[in-house]
Amino acid sequence: MKNTLLILFLLLFGPITYSQESFYPIKDNITRFIIDGIISDDEWNNAIEVDLDYEVNPGNNISPKEKTKVFIVYSDTHLYIGFKAYANPKEVRASIRSRDDFGMISDDFIVVAFDTYGDSRNNYLLLANAFGSQLDARAVNAITDEDRYDINFNVDFETKGNIVSDGFEIEFKIPFASLPFPNGNNQEWNFNFRRNSFRNGVPIELRSQPFDRTAPCQICQTTDKLILKDIKIEKRIEFLPYVAGNVTGKKETILDQINYEKFNPNLGLGINLDLSKNSTLELTLNPDFSQVEADVTQIDVNSSVALEYPERRPYFNRGTDIVQYTTGAFYSRSINNPLISTKLISQGKKERVFFLTALDQNSVYQIAGEDRSYLGQGDESFVNVLRYQRLINKNSRLGLLTTNRYYKNGGYGNLLGTDGWFLLSDKLRFTYELFLNFNKEPNADWIDSDDNIFGRTVTLDDQTFTGKSLNFQLYRNTEKWMSYLTYRDFSPNFQADVGFVVKNNRKWGTLYHAYQIFPNKPALQYFSIGTKADLLYTYEDYLKTISIDGILSIKTLFNTEINYTHDRDVFKNFLGRDYRNLPSNRFQIRSSPNESLAINLNLTFGRDLAYNEESPEIGREFNFYLMPAIQLNNKLRISPSVRYARLRYMNNDNYYYNGSISRFSVRYQFNNFFNVRIVSEYNTFSERFFIQPLIQWNPNPSTVFYIGGNQNSLNDFNDDLSSIFRVDQTQIFLKFQYLIGL
């Protein structure tokens, strides 16, 4: 028994180690570094060298065919890193891109990865391509790349790159003040370097240390040590004022001229104060959270629940890796229009704290049901979010969360819960989330519905209720097999007023198992075939869903990834009615054969329900999405796209719905900071057209100037004129936001 307990303790709390090496760069306060993308001996003669000795893709930790040398030196306040990447310059893929342009992953680029706390809570990734265009991201432990990387995370750093006769060179200048790390003048960070290239259409990744691509925790493998002695800890005091304004105009009738209203000015202020190196207080007053570029419109014509959109507001993105949950317990976009908000982030060696408050002027109120969700627009509310996480060691952590929303005219939503993450071995991981909610509805007319949820009316009429959610997952990954077992439990009255929960009343089990190989051949770089089974019951023990999937994934020539899923709903119950045998086929193809072209194609066909019909019936589904990105030269890129969706009756040629959303974007990038772009979109579902020209200057993550406009048609006038490509309503807007650091 004692031996069993000891083994269990070591699995839960014992460290799992990867290979590591320590590096001691020289401190140099004399050399005046000019970040120009040229590795000169005069500047880098005091630097230590690191080689990228491992090809981790497609080869498995083999010697690389191309050399990469890295030079490291530091001063009191900055870390300097230079890269000399040897290659045939004609084969180097690169374009001049704006900051955080995700298309940069189709270029040759360099990655600097830091785990500044050395406990795998996250990795800070600083990327630059051969022209010095930047992308920064925060990586967390997750199964998929989509969940793993947050590119909305920002670090203020300087880069410059050049393509030279024997490859390309990039210089990084990274202020210590821009990165979170523990208190103290002597630092020991985990780090590694990476280089991504494309040769003959095959993606190649080199690293400065070995990498186990089948490990259940990828970010745990940033383990080389960077030793920095006697650096200066600078506390930041930053002010971020902005001035903005807009003019709107609208036609009263189709034949009228546009009548413009008066100029509407606006101003606000953000304050960022370092209480210590690992504790930051932020305050924003009357923030302007308008997006520079409109969200890509999603097709929701056949969705019975609200759709989730990514967070693009920088204020809410900072620190949110601490509050990421699979159950939707926190969703920052539920805080819709705050008048004032404060945020405290503290990251110690063994704990993390996230505390957010906001006075939301236009609250979103969302109710989850068994088959539908209900969304209403409320009035003012006060929001609290408090998150505490204890990092037991590199492989184990526990957390607590409480969220509160109190509505101005009565009612509240409180959530309390705990979560945990445990790396049980180098192949096995366990996670869980458990939440309880305590709610009282406001007495309001925000939602108009006669529906009931487990005996509770959807109408907001002062009812009180409680609920719970549970999620746990056991995940295993080896060289040949990938598996996970997930159980999700949402009670009928579970609700997260500061989260995103669209369905409840379900006990849901999922089993996934796949065989995978890495052949290391150009025509077949990766192959995976697997199956996934879902079984779902309600709290009344009624069978809700039996679903079985077959899944195939291939990585092949021309940097192409192909995914196919056959999703067969053997049984489905929707709104109390049973349906059987609903097969669906989904293809996804992503390809970037060269630096001039990238293609994303999604295709779905099969059978599905017409969910929004009064009496849902089965129809023949066909969905299509195509987006090619065409780089005409180093500065000019066009990105057309079309989303098409239809659901046809089974017995005739009529349609439940049939429409498309066409989008066209063209961007000219003068340099890494200044661009002009035009976005247009035509939506046949709403019979609406809009066009948005924009000029933007963005020299760092916080300073921005833009001027642009939105011009669109109004579907109220569609019966009066056949052409949809007209302007009935317009808005001209501008904003100047400037970071002032003391």
Image (spheres, rainbow, N blue to C red):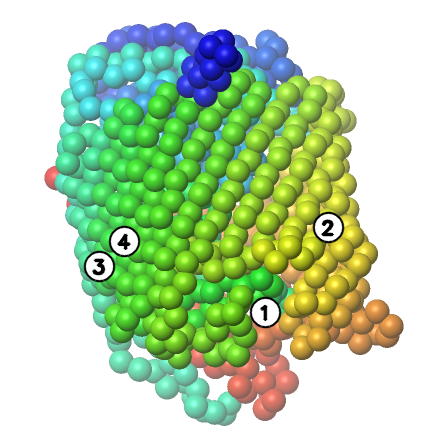
Query: Real-space Cα distance between discs 2 and 3?
Result: 47 Å
Which of label 2 and label 3 is nearer to you? 2
540 vs 405, nearest the viewer: 540
Q: Kindly identify which residue carries mark 2.
A: 546
Q: Identify the mark nearer the N-term, 3 or 1.
A: 3
Residue drawn at (47%, 65%) of the image = 367
Q: Amino acid at mark 4?
A: Asn
> Measured from the top left, where is residue 339 in percent x and y?
24, 63
Q: Kindly identify which residue carries mark 4.
A: 384
Q: Secondary structure at mark 4?
A: strand
Q: Are marks 2 and 1 in contact (CB under 8 Å)?
A: no
The quadrant where residue 572 appears: bottom right
The quadrant where residue 544 appears: bottom right
Q: Identify the mark nearer the N-term, 2 or 3.
A: 3
Position of 471 relative to 414 (above/below)? above
Residue drawn at (78%, 67%) of the image = 619
Which of label 3 and label 1 is nearer to you? 3
Q: Secondary structure at mark 2?
A: strand
Q: Kindly identify which residue carries mark 3.
A: 340
Which of label 3 and label 4 is nearer to you? 4
Query: Real-space Cα distance between discs 2 and 1?
Result: 38 Å
Alpha-carbon neighbours of circle 2 within 10 Å: few (<14), some, or many (≥20)?
A: some
> Measured from the top left, where is residue 466 in percent x and y?
41, 58
Position of 541 relative to 274 (above/below)? below
Q: Kindly identify which residue carries mark 1.
A: 682
Query: Real-space Cα distance between discs 3 and 1?
Result: 36 Å
Position of 307 relative to 532 (above/below)? below
> Measured from the top left, where is residue 554 in percent x and y?
73, 33
